[in-house]
Structures are given as C-alpha cells and as structure tokens.
Amino acid sequence: MTLAIESQNLGTEVAVTGTLFRFATAGSVDDGKSTLVGRLLHDSKAILADQLEAVTRTSTERGFGGESGGIDFALLTDGLRAEREQGITIDVAYRYFATPARSFILADCPGHVQYTRNMVTGATTADAVIMLIDARKGVLEQTRRHLSVVALLRVPHVIVAVNKIDLLGYDEAAYRKVEASVRLVTAELGIGLLGNGGVHVIPVSALVGDNVVDRSERTPWYAGPSLLELLETLTVIDDRGESGRAAEAFRLPVQLVLRPQGAVVVAPELADSYRDYRAYAGQVASGSIRIGDTVNVEPGGGTSTVTGIDFAGVDLDEAFAPQSIALRLADDLDIARGAVIAAADTLPPVTRTLEADLFWLDPRPLAPGARVLVKFGTTVVQALISAVTGRLDLTTLAVEPATGLAVNDTGQASIRLSRDLPVERYAQNRRSGAFLVIHPQDGATLAAGIVTAPGEPTHAGDGSGAGLEVSP
Amino acid sequence: MRAPPVTTALVSTPATTHRLSELDVLESEAIHIIREVVAEFERPVLLFSGGKDSVVVLHLAAKAFWPGKIPFSLLHVDTGHNFPEVLEFRDKTVATHGVRLIVATVEDYVADGRLVERADGTRNPLQTLPLLDAIAAGRHDAVFGGARRDEDKARAKERILSLRDEFGQWDPRNQRPELWNLYNGRHTVGQHVRAFPISNWTELNVWRYIERENIDLPPLYYAHEREVYRRDNMWRAVSPVSPPRVDETVELRTVRYRTVGDMSCTGAVDSNAASVADVVREVGVSTITERGATRADDRISEAAMEDRKKEGYF
C-alpha cells in the first residue's frame, strides 16, 4: 500500500501495564467536538495509516483537503453511512487509544440528537467528561444542561475545554471571562463540591492543536496542563484511595451460583474435593473483601463469613472493585441470583419505596401509575411509578411542577417496588444506587434512574421478602 | 473429566497489587458480561471460528464458570473456504474444553441453490443466512461473538448487548442506551441478542492477553513460509479456492495472518513474528489496522461492515 501520508504515523509504543481511563466528550453543535476528538486521536498517533488515508481521500473529495492537506477529522468518528451523508453524528461511538502512560476508552456523545440520552449513556461509566465550549459563545443553555447531567450523575472529573481560542487571537482577557462564567455555573451546580474530583478549565484550539496534546506557546498566560496530560494523570474511579469506588462499602450483586455438582474441569485427582463446591459469582460493585470478613446477605438478612475468594482457580486473599470473582461462605445460606452480599452492618434496611431522579430516554412519555420493571444490580423486580413529583429545569436544576415526563426530560418520581430491596442513595454508592427502568412488554430501556432517598424500612412481619420476583 | 484448560494461565495472574491493570479490568468486565448473559438467557451459544478473538472469549468463559464446565455450545459457520489448520485447531480446542460444536455449512446452501456463489468468489457475505438458520434451529436467544469496537467504524457504535430482530438485523438508529454495567437483555419472541464481551478490547489488548494467559492459537497467526501471490495489495494464499490468475506470480514468503477468515478474502502480511512476544511487539508499532491490512471484504465500500451487520452479520 503506497501512502503519501504514511510518514505522519510512525506507530507508538504504549504502556504495558497501564491503567484504563474512561472518558466521555460532550458539546453543543459546532463547538468543534469531532475536530477535538480527531485531533486527540491523530496527535496521540492513534489513527493508523489506512484510516488516515481513507479520511484524507474523503476530505479531498468533499473539498476539505487538496494540496493544503486539510483533514475533516469528523469523518474519523462518524461511522455510519447516514452520518457521513448527512454530516451529523447519530449515536455514541467508542474510540480506543493509548499513550505510554495510560490506555483510554472515549465515549463520543453527539450533541444535537437525543443529547440527554447520549450524555447519560456516556457519563454513567466515565471517569471524566470533557465539555466543549466555543470560546466566542461562552456558556450556552445547552452547556448548562450538559453540566447538570454531569452533576446529577456525579462524574468524578469535569474538564471544560474552551475551544477556538485561536479565533480570539489567544487573548487572555477573553478567555478569563469565559473561564469565570464556567466556574460560576459549575459552582452553582455543585460540581467539584461533590467530594470526588474537580473542574478543570483549559484553553484549546482543536483545529490548530493548542493545548490538546502539547502545551501551546501561544497561550503563555495559561500555566496548566494540556488536555492529554490531564487525562493521563486524573485518578481512575476504581482506584483505591479516599475517593475511589473501592473505598466504598463492599457490595457483591450475585450473578449466579456456581455449583458444578461433579461436572468440573479440575484435574481428576482433585475432582473429589470439588464435589460440594458452591460459590457466589459476581463482579465486586464497590469496596473490598478479605477472607475471614463477616458479610450480610439480602434478601433474607443472613450473616456468614468469607471462607474463599476464587478467581478461576486462583485463591485470592482479597478482592476489590471491579473484579469478577466467586465468593465461598462458611454457612449454607439461601442465596440466588439477585441477592447482594455486603460488608457486615453496612446495608441499609430493606424497603419497598424510593424517591429517584429519572432520566427519561424513551419516546413514549411517562404517566404516573405506569407499571414497569426495574433492574438494580442483578435483580429485576416489578415496580409502579406512583407519582411524578417534579421535572428538573436542567439549566438551573430548579424543580418545576410536572405530572409526567417526556423523552429527554429529567424528573423526580416516587416508585413502589413489588419486593423488599436494600435500596441505597446514589450519592452513597454509584453502583448500588443506580437502576434501569424497563418496559414490561417490549423490554425497552425507558429510563436511567438514580436513588435520591430510600423509603421507610419494611417492618418485620409484613411479608418481607415474599414479594413477586420477575424471572429474567 | 479433563485437566483444566486454563491452569497455566491461572498461576501467573494473582492480584498482587491494589490497582488493576488494564487487562485485569477488561477481563473482569468480559467475565461479568458472559455471566449476565448465561444467567438471563435460556439458550446462549458462542460463535467460534478458531480466530483469536473467539478463542479469547472461550478462554474467558472457561474462567467465568470455573470449576464448572462452560454451560453453552459453540457454533461455527463453515464457509468451505476455511484454512485447514484452523479447522484442525477448532476441533482440538472443542475437545480440550469438553464443549459441543454445532457446524452450519455454507457449502450445503450453495449445493442446493439456497445461496448463489458470488462473482468475486468470496463466501464471507454468504455466512449470514446459514448463521440465522442455525440460530433459529437451535432456538438460541443469545449469541456470543468476539467482535471488538476498535475493528471498524460501524462496530464502534454497536452495544455490548445488541438486540436483533427475527431477520438478525441491526438497527443502529434504534439501539438501547447502555447504562452503568446494567445490561438489559429483555427481548420478545423471535428476537435475539448478540453479546460482545470483548467490545472494549483493542487488537493489542487481545495479543497481550494471549501472551499473559498463554493461550493456544492456530499456527498461521505466527510467521511461517507460504506460497503466496500479490492481489489488492495483500499476500493471498495459493489454495484450491484462491488460485492465482495467470498474470499473478507465486512466490514463497515468510508471512503471518493478522485475522483469520476465508482463504478467499483474507490476506497475509510480511512478518518475522514467530512468537507471541514478537507479535505483541509488531502490533504495538503497526501503522495499519488489522482489517485494512488483511480483509478484502471490508474494502468493497466504506460502509461494507455496516451493510453486512444490518443484514444480520455479526
């Protein structure tokens, strides 16, 4: 293959045992998000020669390139035929790149079509969100709406990239004005005060490359890191430490019970010792666990001690989020899929009601009284949305009165569960406090939910645990 | 009862630090997905070609259910154009893991006229019908695949759990949002779900994992001598289903395959990478994507993969 541009990409050595960092990008129309993403991938050498050749060829065909060598970076991320034909981005696209410091998963969230749905999708798994702002326009209503979603979902790090700084002639005063308004809005929304990360504001030009990978000489008044430097050094949500998920209380939602009953793959001479093997398989949602630790199990309220932590044949002394393990317990408790194994005395009392914020994602509107399914961890239960108590004005986070929710609305609702669950606030635990709202007939995901307040504890003797469970 | 197929790997990967490496995070994510699908679906099946990605998914499945056996069957769509050494590897691997293999054969469809041979001779696009028939015949409600999002621009937009209608079609404009690690596998009669546990892995992740876990692969992934000829800027193997034209010169070269598909559409690359470590080094500095380097079928148009996926391809 002969490539005129092959010399631009010499390949790149990447980290061998680096960490994985997940981030999402968001912005309004024409903020230059696709250009920023393309620039990040291109300058970090993540675009390979054949991809670059295809994009350069198409750019030239459409009058972008020619001898000036201009590349329409948006073509790198617009993967579907309709997107390229219409020049829009339809759905969240995932990109992968690595530097010597770290590997990255980028969820590129389009800004104009179903932006709430896309933002929510990208933000639920992100360690950081990059918000793009056009330096000439400053903070727009849509910027505030995006930042509100980021605040509600408690994304640990928020990076605001003030783009097109070249069009302002690299003027410090103009940038400081935008930066000040960003700080004002993020403070209003409580971002950076939520305990985890913080707000970082960077002047960039995605088109020219200022402060994207390397620090720019054209912004001597900016002393902070480049965008990539920041991405390489921010803490990962799963990291242990005071702010990471592993510092939260131990939770293991049980996916299934491993009970091979003799049909084992271990060596024949060991087969006998695995005859009565029984372990609870799941991915640690938060916290860590050690052999000998006491645990509680819900539903049922049982208590036991951890006797083994298996990772496919390796005995571990300790496991932590987000490891997928199998836990063995000293006592023979009645534990099935949907149960939660938790560090002793850390689970809230079970309840059948809760208050939640709902990000409504389905075109069909929500009316109070809707019967739905909710999925918490590995449990699916029937539920009733008994009331919509308000809709959030995402530009201010103020609550307006509402009787229903439409697509892309965020609202507050009261929910009744058909079964007792140990419900936790999202603010306390990002995994246990999150749930899906699912259509009971066609199975569509209707909403993303986060618990704002668990209801009154279910009292002993009123049928606790005897509710209706829905099989998957 | 058999020796555990994953023993060698297991001793080498204890969690010694409190920070998980990239591979550990991806491995736990994949195991979580595999367990969710097995717990929520009645009759899952794994598409197994003997290619490196499906081999890695099989290895992850063995880990997910240890010390039990893998609780689902494997399905291979045999185009009749497979490399013989890959079929041999496939059968050996199936035996090692003690799983059942279902083979759907494109040749049967061509023989009785349900499918018509293409002018360019490639049978890769012909896989879709036998695949959908096999899914229907086995009443499979979930189909695992080894597809990765870094492979192609259309795949970059596909969900980890991807809902398909009774025609197997992917509707990219109407996908379920994927929130936290809460997968929604609910589906109605006639629908099924494609599940891609290694969606978030890159080609380099796959090779580093193969190296770390000491996973066996078909020999053609490593440098070997082969009779090849140049076509479409790729080295094509001389075989009964991919003969050289009169104007094409056959030469003996040291090559390896980055992807393993049909002999009629997969090209080899010049390489001296004879071991896993060599390959990891080579992939780490490669300047061309694996599909760009080796797949004639993805070059038909810029949206070749998207079009095939909409028709039910995986």
Image (spheres, coloured by chain):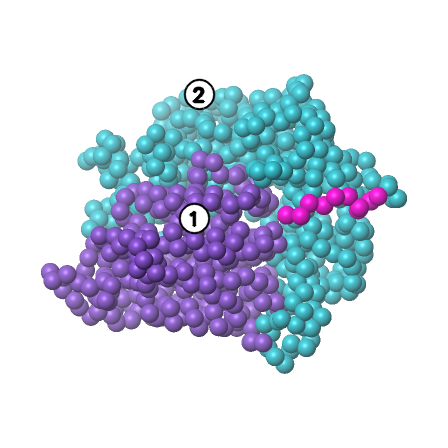
Q: How crowded is the residue under tag 1: few (<14 C-alpha within 10 Å), some, or many (20+)?
A: many
User: Would you say the residues marked 2 and 1 are in contact, meaning their CB atoms lie under 8 Å apart?
Assistant: no
Tell me the quarter of the picture where residue B20 sits.
Answer: bottom right
The answer to whether residue A11 is visible is: no
Of tags 2 and 1, the one toward the viewer is 1
Query: Residue beneath label 2, please?
Result: A137
Q: How crowded is the residue under tag 2: few (<14 C-alpha within 10 Å), some, or many (20+)?
A: few
Q: Residue at x 63, y 38 (%)?
A: A440
Tell me the quarter of the picture where residue B188 sits.
Answer: top right
Q: In the image shown, does B50 or B276 lie closer to the viewer?
A: B50
Residue with the most extreme left position: B247
Determine whether the residue tagged by mark 2 lies in a helix, strand or loop.
loop
Q: Which residues are magenta?
A: A463-472
For badge 1, the amino acid type reads Arg
Queried whether the magenta region covers residue B73, the answer comes back as no
Cα–Cα span, label 2 and label 1: 34 Å
Q: In the image shown, does A67 or A232 lie closer to the viewer?
A: A67
User: Which chain is disc 1 placed on?
Assistant: B
For badge 2, the amino acid type reads Lys
Q: Estimate the x, y position of residue A114 in percent, counting from the top left.
A: 49, 29
Q: Color of chain A here?
A: cyan
Q: Is residue A70 left or right of residue A105?
A: left
Q: Estimate the x, y position of residue A431 in percent, counting from the top left.
A: 65, 44
Which label was assigned to residue B149? 1
Queried whether the magenta region covers residue A468, the answer comes back as yes
Q: In the image shown, does B221 or A334 lie closer to the viewer?
A: A334
Q: Color of chain B here?
A: purple
User: Which chain is disc 2 placed on?
Assistant: A
